[in-house]
Image (cartoon, rainbow, N blue to C red):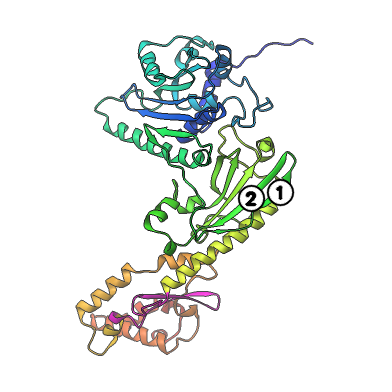
């Protein structure tokens, strides 16, 4: 059969790889994956601000590469997803180094040593696009070599990945303090992300040493496994075609059982709401952090903030789980979804119980009955909000002659500042069926309580200069009196 060779045009392929949607934290994590796959014990991530010459580097003391292996590593898709990999290899498609790097920088430099001799290769995307050829350089400019020499130090083995001409910083100057602040803000996000994604590698007997700009990266445990008040549901193991999936659910302690530092730390890089849900691990590397995996009827709500579930997936099941190139999203197999949904609902209900109990305590008179300004209860499947008549300020204003202007202003201010938003959020069920309704939402004859309130409003408007007819007209347009019948409708 006749055929023609149709190699991809470099500029188009670079544009495709650069637009895969990598965030900077995800891109750096992809480079760290290679260091862990190379059995590195020490991994250093460095962010250095130098105006237009700002750079980022990841260095390790792993196995290193020979010149041939280095060229293969720099070649796009030289190893596909079906290539045989070691048990500790975190790779998947063979494009991680290139796609992650091209998404962040115009120059990718890798230098590596397996036996004491360092070899360097460099992609300069500007030259690739201008020449239309994949020219992989084995030399670099003097400034780049100076950076590499410093990063190598006295090391005789390992790999260094260096990004130069970073996207978004190519035209910055010394006077651009806004860009500098943005760069270091991104650096903090990357550090937190690494502590979350590689937490399992930073603890235990065979832990790696990971440093970020010289400081140790702190692992983040989303499950607070060392806290005595964490509720751990029995782990489950479910066979799949290429091994088994292990699932373990955790319900974190409520706020009263956490110190302020523990509460802030447990919120994680993205905050309590975004960190609830499933945590999917692949070879101990966190792929997905805080997501309900698109399971039917499960969405993020604050009353489920304490629900977190660990899922360990075998790397051999990548295809069934739909692992993407960035290793940042997964879709559970159809056969496993009912199991995950069942466990999620159980965990969410347990978490809601913990939060709901806290909410009720905060809403009602717990301990000292004079503390809380508002009461929130559920009556006949509806939420009911009431001002606490036992509160001293409320009692004082309610007594004959007690409605002094200063005291009334103080009460109004207190009510404004203590609206029970958190409690309502916790106790509110999905949908609007249990929304609080004024005076029980009756579209009928007003009772004595409603009439008394309406009478006071009516008299206040008349005292303010309105005629009785005008006051009645205005009362008929006010909620909830516009839905009720009384003296103002006659």
Residue 141 occupies which quadrant of the picture? Answer: top left
Residue that label 1 marks: 238
- Residue beneath label 2, please? 247
Q: Report if residue 342 lies within the magenta region.
A: no
Q: Quadrant of the C terminus?
A: bottom left
Find numbered disc 2 in the image and state the secondary structure of the residue it sits on: strand
User: Residue 479, relative to residue 129: is it above or below?
Assistant: below
Is residue 489 positioned above or below 256 on the image? below
| Circle 2 crowding by C-alpha within 10 Å: few under 14, some 14–19, many from 20 | many
Q: Please give the name of the residue rendered at 41% of the width and 39% of the height, measured from the top-left corner.
A: 189
**What is the number of the mark on residue 141?**
none
Left-right relation of 242 to 283:
right
**Left or right of 32 on screen, residue 395:** left
Q: Quadrant of residue 263?
A: bottom left
Residue 240 in percent (x, y) is at 73, 43
Identify the residue at horizontal 45%, vertical 47% (top origin): 270
Task: Please name whichever residue, 262 or 306, is drawn nearer the observer in this view of the structure.
Answer: 262
Q: Badge 1 local density, few (<14 within 10 Å), some, or many (20+)? A: few
Residue range of the region highlighted in magenta in the rendering: 364-393
């Amino acid at each position: 059969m006749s055929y023609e060779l149709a190699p991809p045009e470099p500029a188009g392929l670079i544009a495709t790889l650069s637009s895969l949607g990598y965030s900077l934290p995800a891109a750096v994590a992809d480079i760290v994956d290679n260091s862990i796959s190379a059995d590195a014990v020490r991994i250093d991530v460095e962010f250095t601000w130098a105006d237009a010459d700002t750079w980022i580097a990841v260095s390790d003391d792993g196995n290193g590469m020979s010149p041939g292996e280095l060229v293969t590593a720099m070649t796009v898709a030289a190893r596909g997803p079906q290539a045989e990999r070691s048990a500790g290899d975190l790779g998947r498609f063979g494009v991680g180094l290139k796609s992650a790097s091209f998404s962040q920088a115009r120059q990718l430099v890798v230098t590596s040593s397996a036996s004491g001799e360092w070899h360097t290769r460099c992609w300069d995307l500007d030259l690739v696009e201008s020449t239309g050829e994949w020219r992989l350089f084995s030399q670099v400019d003097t400034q780049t070599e100076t950076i590499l020499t410093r990063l190598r130090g006295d090391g005789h083995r390992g790999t260094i990945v260096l990004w130069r001409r970073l996207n978004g910083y190519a035209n910055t100057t010394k006077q651009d303090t806004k860009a500098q602040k943005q760069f270091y803000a991104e650096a903090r996000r990357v550090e937190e992300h690494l502590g979350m994604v590689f937490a399992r590698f930073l603890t235990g007997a065979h832990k790696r040493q990971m440093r970020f700009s010289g400081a140790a990266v702190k692992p983040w445990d989303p499950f607070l496994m060392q806290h005595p008040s964490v509720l751990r549901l029995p782990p489950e193991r479910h066979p799949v075609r290429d091994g088994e999936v292990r699932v373990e659910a955790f319900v974190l302690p409520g706020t009263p059982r956490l110190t302020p530092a523990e509460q802030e730390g447990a919120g994680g890089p993205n905050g309590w709401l975004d960190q609830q849900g499933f945590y999917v691990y692949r070879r101990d590397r966190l792929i997905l952090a805080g997501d309900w995996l698109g399971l039917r009827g499960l969405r993020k709500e604050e009353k489920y903030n304490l629900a977190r579930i660990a899922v360990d997936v075998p790397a051999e099941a990548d295809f069934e789980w739909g692992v993407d190139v960035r290793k940042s999203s997964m879709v559970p197999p159809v056969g496993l979804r009912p199991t995950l949904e069942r466990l999620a609902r159980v965990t969410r209900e347990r978490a809601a119980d913990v939060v709901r109990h806290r909410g009720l305590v905060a809403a009602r008179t717990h301990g000292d009955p004079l503390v809380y300004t508002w009461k929130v209860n559920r009556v006949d499947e509806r939420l009911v909000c009431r001002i606490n008549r036992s509160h001293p300020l409320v009692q004082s204003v309610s007594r004959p002659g007690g409605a002094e202007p200063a005291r009334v202003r103080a009460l109004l201010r207190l009510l404004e500042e203590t609206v029970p938003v958190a409690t309502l959020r916790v106790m509110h069920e999905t949908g609007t069926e249990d929304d609080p309704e004024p005076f029980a939402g009756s579209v009928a004859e007003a009772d004595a309580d409603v009439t008394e309130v309406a009478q006071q409003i009516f008299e206040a408007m008349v005292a303010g200069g309105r005629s009785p007819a005008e006051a009645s007209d205005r009362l008929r347009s006010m909620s909830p009196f516009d839905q009720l019948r009384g003296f103002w409708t006659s």
